[in-house]
Each structure stands twice: as structure tokens, then as C-alpha cells.
Image: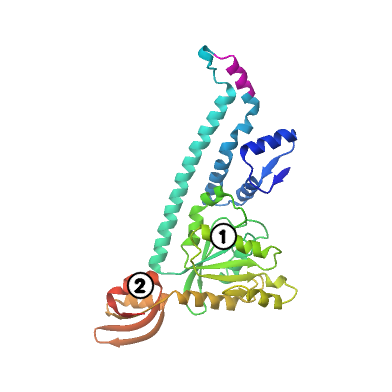
């Protein structure tokens, strides 16, 4: 097998195979290899749809390679063509056109199914916004330890492995922070340098989870020799997703593997809002929780409202999703000063006495 660390154009791959002239040697480019890995790890219906779409779009312009033996037959038939020099279509051309139509139909079908998934996710996100539960997206280079960190933060048992793209489907867990606020942590597919555009398009429904998050926790494998390149890659992908303006907390993971603990503190000083942690040993998790709470607090809006006693539901929502600073019971209602998420501010707007 020969693997190229870039995407080959269909004609490039064809010429390389001709030059090698050995059917026992397989030629793969970077995109084909990543798609193969994704296919092995697509365990859910959504993941399988996304990977199959990317594979179909990758294979469509490369179909000619699969039928070169029939194309030669087609050429002979054309040479013996009918009136006006227009040859009859040979079996190779017919098979190729049939395959293209079949893949084209499959692509259209997959896009429709994924669009339904996207609509379902959008409805789910709207419900989350109505509940005003903050969403924290875990992002990072593949194999940085996001799933292990999610398990450590939530006490769950999400599948985690020391391998590329172990997680394809977003996994969400509800976690109560030490300060009492509930948040949703979402683990997402890992990023990689030169991520194939077909995959970015196919995983749009999944990656939208990141752009819609209230806070991003960027998980970094601090022990990796190419850590700076990996960080730059993740930030570039976030920018492409339109999520670069989201507040970010950086979790420098795997400090348990560092020979000198002072290395973790030195590395943390190089990043803004960075915390050194070990998802494996739980070291540094209290500091990470504190940084997450602080970052979420910075997004809160301070309001003063007078809530009628009949709106006990809004008072409960304030206590559940915000930070109540003062509460007094007066004639005609409860006067509350609190800091609340911007997402639920419209519900309190009719009862405002002041806002800062």
C-alpha cells in the first residue's frame, strides 16, 4: 500500500496507479484513509449517514478507475460506430453512467436524511435554549482526550480510546457545577490538520453543536510533540465554523504524563484562560470547573425585576439558571436582583426595574 499525505485528484491517482502497474499495491490518499477510519467508527445511524455521504462524494469523480477494463471495450464499439460516425455506447460507458446515476441518487437521499437530522438537532437546541441550560462544547485535536475528560467531568462512561476519531457522534451529559448551576457538556468529533472538506460538509449537523455552544473548552494534549500545530489547527477550524467568537477555556490535558509537574504550570502561562489537568487522574479538575463557572458568569446579564407572585415559575427559573444576588418580598410581588443568561432575558423583560 502507498499512502499520500494529501488529497490526490482523480487523474493524479489514476496516473500513479498506471506508473506502479501492480494491482496488488493499493494507492490511498489522505482523504480515503480518514474516510476508512471514520467508517470503522461510525456506530450510530447519524454517524453512518455522515460517513457514507462523504464517501459517496469522494468516490463519484473517481468512478472511471473502477471500469477501465470495460472502457476499452466501449472504445472498440465506438470505433465501429453507426451512421454519421456516432458510435454505440459500449458496456463500459453504460455501466459507468449507471453507477454515476446510482451514486448521485444515493447522495441526494443521504442529504435529505441528514437534513432531517439537522432539523431534529435544531429543535433540540431550541428546547435547550428555552430551558436556558448552558452548553459547553469540548473540542480539540483528535486523540487529545476529550471523551476521557467528559467522563471525568460527568462521572459517565462515554467510549474513550487511545486512537484517532474514537468519537464521531456528539455525546451530551448534564453536569451540576460546584456552584450549583447545571450545564450540558457535549463531546464532539476530533479535528485534524487538512480535514477533508467532504467530511466538514457531511458533519455539518454535528459541528453546528460547537457554533451554538455558550462556552468552548479546548482540550489540548500538552505532551504531544506538535502541540502548537494542533492548537493552531483547532483554532482555524473553529474560525471556519463561525465559532471563533465563543468564549474559550483551554484544558491542557495529560499532565500525568509529564516528567516534571512544573512544565504544566509553565505551559498554562502561555495560554489565556488555561488550566492544567489530567482527565485520567482527575488532577486539576476543580480548577477547570472554577474556570468554566467564571467564564459562564462573564456572559450573564445583571437585572432587577419585580415578579408578580403568580410568576413563581420565573422566580424558580432565576434560581435554577442564574445567580440571585438579592431577593425581597414586597406588596404586589418579589423584587429580585440577579445575573441571568442572555437566552432567558426576554422572559423577564416585561418585569424589569433596571438592567446593567
Crowd band around label 2 with a 10 angstrom C-alpha radius: few (<14), some (14–19), many (20+)? some
**Rendered residue at 30%/74% (across/down):** 349
The reply to whether the magenta stretch includes residue 336 is no
- Sequence-wise, the earlier of marks 1 and 2 is 1
- Main secondary structure found in the magenta portion: helix
- Vertical placement of 89 versus 261: above or below? above
**Rendered residue at 50%/33% (across/down):** 101
Please name the residue that numbered disc 1 is placed on: 236
Crowd band around label 1 with a 10 angstrom C-alpha radius: few (<14), some (14–19), many (20+)? some
Tell me where the magenta segment starts and ends, as one range.
72-81
How far across and how far down the image is residue 94, in percent?
A: 55, 25
**Rendered residue at 32%/74% (across/down):** 348
In the image, 291 versus 166, the foreground residue is 291
Please name the residue that numbered disc 2 is placed on: 345
Numbered badge on residue 130: none
Q: Residue furthest left?
A: 332
**Rendered residue at 57%/27% (across/down):** 95
In the image, 274 versus 320, the foreground residue is 274
User: In terms of secondary structure, where does tag 2 sit?
Assistant: helix
**How many labels sit on residues?**
2
Q: Is residue 130 left or right of residue 195?
A: left
The reply to whether the magenta stretch includes residue 77 is yes
In the image, 98 versus 353, the foreground residue is 353
Query: What quarter of the picture does the N terminus occupy?
Result: top right
Q: Image quadrant of residue 310? A: bottom left
For the question of whether residue 23 can be seen, the reply is: no
- Mark-to-mark CA distance, 1 and 2: 32 Å
Query: What quarter of the picture does the C terminus occupy?
Result: bottom left
How far across and how far down the image is residue 231, in percent?
A: 62, 64
Kindly indicate whether the residue at mark 2 contacts the one at mark 1 (C-beta within 8 angstroms): no
- Vertical placement of 105 versus 293: above or below? above
Amino acid at each position: 500500500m502507498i499512502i499520500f499525505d494529501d488529497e490526490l485528484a482523480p487523474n493524479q491517482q489514476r496516473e500513479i496507479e498506471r506508473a506502479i502497474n501492480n494491482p496488488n499495491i493499493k494507492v490511498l490518499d489522505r482523504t480515503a484513509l480518514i474516510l476508512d477510519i471514520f467508517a470503522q467508527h461510525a456506530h450510530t445511524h447519524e454517524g453512518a449517514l455522515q460517513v457514507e455521504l462523504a464517501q459517496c462524494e469522494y468516490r463519484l469523480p473517481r468512478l472511471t478507475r473502477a471500469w477501465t477494463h470495460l472502457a476499452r471495450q466501449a472504445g472498440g464499439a465506438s470505433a465501429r460506430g453507426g451512421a454519421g460516425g456516432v458510435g454505440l455506447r459500449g458496456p463500459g460507458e453504460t455501466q459507468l453512467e449507471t453507477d454515476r446515476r446510482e451514486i448521485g441518487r444515493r447522495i441526494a437521499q443521504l442529504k435529505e436524511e441528514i437534513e432531517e437530522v439537522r432539523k431534529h438537532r435544531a429543535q433540540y437546541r431550541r428546547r435547550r435554549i428555552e430551558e436556558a441550560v448552558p452548553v459547553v462544547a469540548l473540542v480539540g485535536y483528535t486523540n487529545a482526550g476529550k471523551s476521557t475528560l467528559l467522563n471525568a467531568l460527568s462521572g459517565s462512561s462515554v467510549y474513550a480510546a487511545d486512537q484517532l476519531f474514537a468519537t464521531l457522534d456528539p455525546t451530551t451529559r448534564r453536569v451540576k457545577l460546584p456552584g450549583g448551576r447545571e450545564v450540558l457538556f457535549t463531546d464532539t468529533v476530533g479535528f485534524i490538520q487538512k480535514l477533508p472538506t467532504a467530511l466538514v460538509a457531511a458533519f455539518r449537523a454535528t459541528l453546528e453543536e460547537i457554533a451554538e455552544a455558550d462556552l468552548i473548552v479546548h482540550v489540548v494534549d500538552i505532551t504531544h510533540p506538535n502541540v502548537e500545530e494542533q492548537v493552531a489547527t483547532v483554532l482555524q477550524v473553529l474560525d471556519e465554523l463561525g465559532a471563533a467568537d465563543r468564549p474559550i477555556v483551554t484544558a491542557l490535558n495529560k499532565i500525568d504524563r509529564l516528567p516534571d509537574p512544573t512544565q504544566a504550570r509553565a505551559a498554562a502561562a502561555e495560554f489565556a484562560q488555561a488550566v492544567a489537568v489530567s482527565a485520567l487522574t482527575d488532577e486539576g479538575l476543580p480548577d477547570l470547573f472554577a474556570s468554566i463557572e467564571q467564564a459562564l458568569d462573564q456572559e450573564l446579564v445583571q437585572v432587577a425585576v419585580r415578579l408578580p407572585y403568580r410568576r413563581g415559575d420565573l422566580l424558580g427559573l432565576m434560581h435554577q439558571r442564574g445567580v440571585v444576588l438579592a431577593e425581597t418580598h414586597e406588596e404586589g410581588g418579589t423584587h429580585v436582583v440577579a445575573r441571568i443568561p442572555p437566552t432567558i432575558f426576554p422572559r423577564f423583560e416585561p418585569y424589569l426595574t433596571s438592567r446593567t
